[in-house]
Image (cartoon, grey):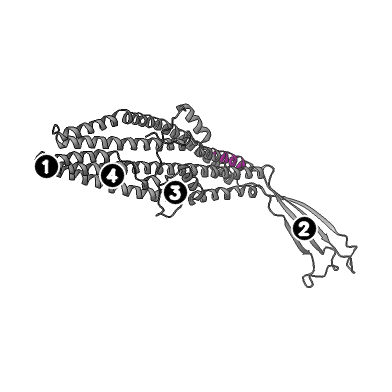
Amino acid sequence: MKRYYVLALLMLFTLWSAPATAEERSVQPENLTALVAAAVTNNPELKASESRWQMFASRVKQAGALDDPMVMLKVQNTPARDPLVFNSDPQSAKVIGIAQQLPFWGKRGLRRDVARYEADAYHWAFEERKLELKRMVKESYYQLWAVDKGLTIVSKNLQLLSNFITITELKYSVGQGVQQDIFKAGLEKSKMVEMQITLQQQRKSLEATLNYLLSRPGDTPVGPVADFSLPPLTLSREQLNAKANEGRPQAKSLGSLKEKADTSRRLARRELYPDFNVSLEYMIRDAVSTEMATDPGDNMVSLGVTFNLPLQWQKRQAMVAESTFESAMAAGELQALKNSISYTINETLVQLERRRKLIELYKGGLIPQAEQSLQSALISYRVGKVDFLTLLDSRMNLFNYERELYESQAEYMMKLAQLEAATGSDLTATPGPSSR
């Protein structure tokens, strides 16, 4: 019986370090760059945002264009009893005219500028939406990696607990253990199965989220995520803030809205000046020879200018006030955004530093020590120097440290993605393969 007990322990150590199966090695991992590119290409919300920008960009030429000229055709001063007779009265004529509405000087350019700034705002809103989409894809990607790692260590611990049950049963059968140890090991295995079910459901939810972002069918399978190394962040807090002020699309969008409001205010003031309507008429007259009058019927030309009287002062003052408040609103939102960006950068840098230190602690200290502690507990339990609870505690400590390591690595990359979204630029190269 002792021989079987030793064989069980050997099997435990073999399974503990068993390599991945050929099937697991053959699965191709997902590529983050390809996923981000697919999301940018296919996401319908991003397409809608781009179409909105193009729609407003198409209004720029419209805003600066003149109204279509008006052509006039009429008969003038003909007898009502016979309106097509033109040689009975010297004042009768056939008239052809053309008229053109001309805004006061400078209004067309200002209207074009207002439309252009508005289109620019929607362009930067589209770029901001693209940044947000990339961030969400990256966050889902690294969350998937953490869940897959969690499933891996859960599977490893399930196998380990199965071996614990085998050992406890063997020890109990030879009178060296207690039945309570078997029940305790079974309970721990059930808890681990519960955690496995939860992680599997989390993976399905993350797959659905990723497929939604990529505009793919919800049941499209998502492969595993490759390991990565943590890219260093070399920029200082001041440099990150400068990058955000220069490259953040939302800041540029609010800046364009402020420029639009300032231009609208100049346009509203220009509305105090009248617009003009220039017209040209050519009158075709017939010769008249009657008892009452004789006229050779010379053709005539009329040239005229009409203009509106901008007397609605309250209306135009309200237009100036509207654009003034719009400018103040955009300036306030821009300052609030800069404050928010600064806070996000500061908070994210603190979280990145915390996660990096935890990762170094887990890799360099806690996990190796927990592995040694578990191996020592296994050996001691075999010879009866420690009880089964000590063995389970050692196993749980290692499990928790490994899980926290993977969560910290994923959280580091997600915080980095959030920092890139906050600054509007890629801060590091694509993560390379991990050494662990």
Q: Is residue 425 left or right of residue 97?
A: left
Residue 398 picture quarter: top left
Label the magenta part by its dominant secondary structure.
helix
Question: Magenta stretch: residue 261 in it?
Answer: yes
Q: Is residue 178 left or right of residue 209?
A: left
- Residue sitting at x 50%, y 50%: 42
**Residue denoted by label 3:** 213
Q: Nearer the viewer, mark 4 or mark 3?
A: 4
Query: Where is residue 301 shown, x and y percent of the image?
Result: 82, 56
State the CA–CA distance, disc 2 to disc 3. 59 Å
State the CA–CA distance, disc 1 to disc 2. 113 Å
Q: Is residue 399 left or right of residue 108?
A: left
- Residue sitting at x 83%, y 67%: 86
Range shown magenta: 258-268
Q: Mark 2: which secondary structure?
A: strand
Please determine whether, in this image, residue 419 is positioned above or below residue 58: above
Q: Earlier in the sequence, mark 1 or mark 2?
A: 2
Q: Amino acid at mark 1?
A: Tyr
Q: Residues within 10 Å of mark 3 (few under 14, many from 20)?
A: many
Q: Mark 3: which secondary structure?
A: helix
Q: Residues within 10 Å of mark 4 (few under 14, many from 20)?
A: some
**Residue denoted by label 2:** 97
**Residue denoted by label 1:** 172
Q: Earlier in the sequence, mark 4 or mark 1?
A: 4
Q: Mark 1: which secondary structure?
A: helix
**Residue denoted by label 4:** 155
Looking at the picture, tell me which residue is in the foreground, 217 or 343: 217
